[in-house]
Image (cartoon, rainbow, N blue to C red):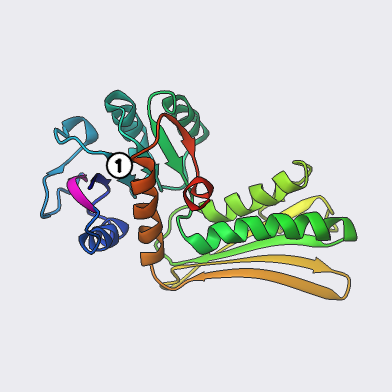
Amino acid sequence: MTHILLHGCGGKMGRVVERIVASDPSCQIVAGIDPSLPSAAYPVFATPEQCTVAADVIIDFSTASAVDALLDYAAKTKTPLVLCTTGLSDEVLEKMKACTAQTAILKSANMSIGINLILNLVQKAAETLYDSGFDIEVVEKHHNQKIDAPSGTAMVIADAINDALDSSMHYVYDRSQTRQKRDCKEIGIHAIRGGSIVGEHDVIFAGQDEVITLSHQAMSKEIFAVGAVKAAKYLAEQGPGFYTMADVLQ
């Protein structure tokens, strides 16, 4: 039985994780952390520092501002952490890396199995198509309540492409301020916000007289929760270090 501490238990994704865990006999939520102190079937604490319940692993779906204190708690208690929150600053990411010396941390901007397959496919496509003159653009769409842009997933996709091309590319987020032709070394990254879109990502490889598009559409938030719970059960058995969904799915 994997005992889970749910950070951000009062949020939308926290509630989805709660439902997924309730239907999985191999794990359970033993405590939650959320400043709103929502009612739950387990004890809830306002901050990590106040938490007195030990767990095998933490699942985090919170806000970027809450992650710094969570990293302190994870390192101090040596509790493995599945970190799903996006929009983290460079300082927090550096702190996360340092904390992997004390405990296992899995960081992913997107927990879905499909997106992690897309990461593999875009690298293969970039290796094949870029030298043939294909331009690369990433377009992401999310609901009107999402506060960070571009999405963490869009950035992970762009980074995967850039890694496949020996880090030779640079990112362009806004072409409205300049009037010039597109640079062949660009990866354009575009964000759309509206309605209740759960999450859509299109990777466009545009060549001479042909266009190839790799797309992923999330139909519900459950796919992220399913992936997070799968990752939590995996990470609870691992030693200190940095992990990704590729480790979970291999």
Q: Is residue 203 above or below residue 79?
A: below
- Residue 150 visible to the viewer: no
Dominant secondary structure (helix, strand or loop) of the stretch shown in magenta:
strand
Q: Residue at x 49, y 60 (%)?
A: 113
On the image, the x and y values in percent for residue 12 come to: 29, 60
Q: Which residue matches tag 1? A: 58
Q: Is residue 31 magenta?
A: yes
Q: Residue at x 76, y 65 (%)?
A: 205
Q: Is residue 228 above or below residue 16?
A: above
> What amino acid is found at the position of numbered circle 1 in the picture?
Ile
Counting every numbered tag in the picture gives: 1
Is 48 left, or right, of 206 in this rendering? Answer: left
On the image, the x and y values in percent for residue 100 come to: 44, 28
Foreground: 150 or 203? Answer: 203
Q: Residue at x 38, y 41 (%)?
A: 235
On the image, the x and y values in percent for residue 8 come to: 27, 48
Q: Dot 1: few (<14), some (14–19), or many (≥20) neighbours within 10 Å?
A: many
Is 216 left, or right, of 125 in this rendering? Answer: left
- Residue 117 visible to the viewer: yes
On the image, the x and y values in percent for residue 24 come to: 25, 60
Res 126 → quadrant: bottom right
Res 178 → quadrant: bottom right
Q: Is residue 87 magenta?
A: no
- Helix, strand or loop at mark 1: strand
Is 37 left, or right, of 229 in this rendering? Answer: left
| Magenta segment | 27-34
